[in-house]
Each structure stands twice: as structure tokens, then as C-alpha cells.
Image (tube, helix red, strand yellow):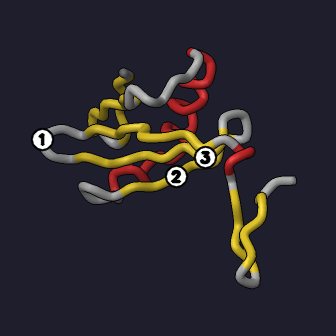
Amino acid sequence: MYRFSIENENWILRFTPNTVLEDDSKEAVVKSILQLGNVLPAFSHGKSFVIMVKKIGLIVFNVEKIPSLILTVSNIIEKENWYIQTDSKIKKYFM
């Protein structure tokens, strides 16, 4: 669990138990959140968003604002598991 501030709001960043990351990867997640700056407070309670970090993959975040400002990393999807649908076909996004 990490604590950080954006625009005088104190946030908590937590990771679900199914999200296992090394400390350097957790630091990359924190740095990506801090780069969002004033975009983060614009998300309303219950919303989700993703950030693609080359080193890690797609990081899925859930926003809670009641009773506290909590950002939860609910899942990380590695590049090997990205797919795209084109012309009614599904194929790997990165080959």
C-alpha cells in the first residue's frame, strides 16, 4: 500500500491479492499515477481506467472516493495476453 498526494488530496494506492509485482514494478506503477496529475481527481467514484506501462503491461485501476480516496490496482494484463478484433477475427495484438 502506498500513500500519495495530488492537488492537496491524499490518496491510497493498493494492490489486490491476485496482483503480484516486484518492488521495482510497483514503483513504476506509482510513477505512472503521479504523471496523471490533475486527471486522477476527475474520475468519479466507481470508475475504472487503464495505463499501459511498457515494462509491465496494461494496469487496470479502480477508483473509490467514498469513504476515502483509494486507487486499487485490480489486475495487470501482460502484453502476451492482449488481443484485438478486426473483421470478425481475434488475433494477438503484439506478435
Q: What residue do we see at 38% from left, 22% from top?
A: 2
Residue sitting at the far front: 89
The location of residue 17, given as percent across then percent down, is 39, 26
| Residue holding disc 3 | 58
The relative height of residue 59 versus residue 90 in the rendered view (above or below) is above
Task: Kindly report the distance in space between the C-alpha atoms of the residues bearing marks 2 and 3.
Answer: 6 Å
25 and 21: which is toward the camera? 21
Give the residue type that dot 1 points to: Pro
44 and 18: which is toward the camera? 18
Mark positioned earlier in the residue sequence (2 or 3): 2
The relative height of residue 7 versus residue 1 in the rendered view (above or below) is below
- Whether pointer 2 and pointer 1 mark residues with C-beta atoms closer than 8 Å, the reply is no
Q: Which mark is residue 67?
A: 1
Q: What residue do we see at 72% from left, 34% from top?
A: 55
Task: Kindly report the distance in space between the C-alpha atoms of the residues bearing marks 2 and 1.
Answer: 23 Å
Give the number of the mark in front: 3 or 1: 3
The location of residue 27, given as percent across then percent down, is 56, 23
Residue sitting at the far left: 67
**Label 3: few (<14), some (14–19) or many (≥20) C-alpha neighbours in 10 Å:** some
- Secondary structure beneath label 1: loop
Mark positioned earlier in the residue sequence (2 or 1): 2
The location of residue 73, given as percent across then percent down, is 43, 38
Give the residue type that dot 2 points to: Val
- Whether pointer 2 and pointer 3 mark residues with C-beta atoms closer than 8 Å, the reply is yes
**Label 1: few (<14), some (14–19) or many (≥20) C-alpha neighbours in 10 Å:** few
Residue sitting at the far right: 95
Q: Residue 26 sits in which quadrant?
A: top right
Q: What residue do we see at 15% from left, 46% from top?
A: 66
Q: What residue do we see at 39% from left, 55% from top?
A: 48
The location of residue 69, given as percent across then percent down, is 24, 40
